[in-house]
Amino acid sequence: MSELVTGEAVALELLPAKFPSRALAVLLDLAAVVITYIAVTMVLVVTTSSLDGAARTALGIATFLLVPVGVPIAVETLSHGRSLGKLALGLRVVRDDGGPIRFRHALVRGAIGVVEILMTFGTIASIASLVSARGRRLGDVFAGTLVVRERIPVGRTGLVAPPPPHLAQRFTGLDLSAVPDGLWLAVRQYLTRMRQLDPGVSSDMARRLAGDLAARTGAPLPVDLPPAVFLAAVVHERQSREARQARQSLGTDGPVAGGVPAPVRPESPGVPSAALASKEQPGERPATGFAPPA
């Protein structure tokens, strides 16, 4: 997703992860951690054989804290919520508002994960995930995070629904020139997937996107419209303008019939078409925008 909207676009593309996929991702992460821990321990045993027992014990404790705890925290922080298991299953950890996690989020998740995953063999984490409506374990609750899906089946995406008819002409005078393409993409993706998101996340996302769009256009956000309706109406207005520009570039004013643009009679300012037609000389053909064959 575009960096424009890591706080929004991540969530736009994502759905809360289900318990089976989360559990499998944790198992893959644990397998990687165990293999790494064993490899590091064996290296330390060989390289520190000359040290006394207290030093080896201290190194063993440090290794346990760094590998099973510190490494997952560092990986989630640097990868913005991905780990080996999550990457394999198309999952990511995000904040409750859909934004990318930071070190403090990963630290809280990792610290509580020692208790609810490592020390209890995942029993507490499994119960918490099954009870939670969004599949969050205790680490997610205290860190304010959520594990979501990054990969959405293509068939689940939809088209942007048109706004109500009475809003069709309301935003015709809105200046859309300062709205970047990335924001249009984020708005469109939200509108196509808004019904797939958690209601609270969807509402917060609509307010943020509507605020960003209103700020770019320089117009105040309508207080009489829900943010999602405002977004749909402005997107519809942009599409209407692009359609009109496409027709003008083809030399047409009206709809295209049968795939062939209808010729448009040029008019002088303030002179109706009927007046021009009355001035045509016999044998002359009005300009149609198409050159006659040579």
Image: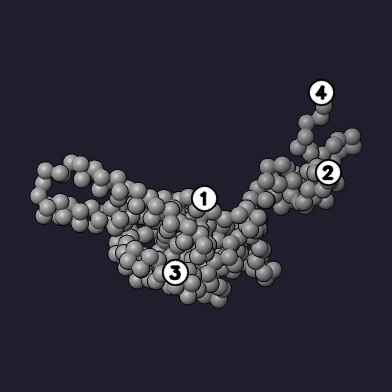
Badge 2 crowding class, 10 Å Cα cut-off, few under 14, some 14 to 19, many 20 or more, is: few
Q: Marks 4 and 3: which is nearer the front?
A: 3
Q: Amino acid at mark 1?
A: Asp
Q: What's the CA distance linking mark 1 and mark 4?
A: 43 Å
Depth-wise, is mark 3 or mark 2 nearer the camera? 3
Element class at badge 3: helix
- Pointer 3 or 1: first along the chain: 3
Image coords of residue 258 (percent x, y):
83, 46
Q: Amino acid at mark 4?
A: Ala
Q: Is residue 116 left or right of residue 64?
A: right
Question: Which residue is tagged 4?
Answer: 294
Question: Which residue lies under the disc numbered 2?
Answer: 279
Furthest residue in direction right, as rendered:
282
Residues at circles 3 and 2 in contact by the CB criterion of under 8 Å: no
* SS assignment at label 2: helix
Q: Measure the alpha-carbon separation of dots 3 and 2.
A: 84 Å
State which mark lies toward you, 4 or 2. Answer: 4
Q: Which residue is mark 3?
A: 126
Q: Earlier in the sequence, mark 4 or mark 3?
A: 3
The amino acid at mark 3 is: Ser
Q: Position of residue 240 (x, y in %)?
A: 66, 55
Mark 1, residue position:
181
Q: Could you say which is closer to the camera, residue 153 or residue 65? A: 65
Neighbor class of circle 3 (other Cα within 10 Å; few <14, some 14-19, many 20+) is many
Report helix, strand or loop for mark 4.
loop
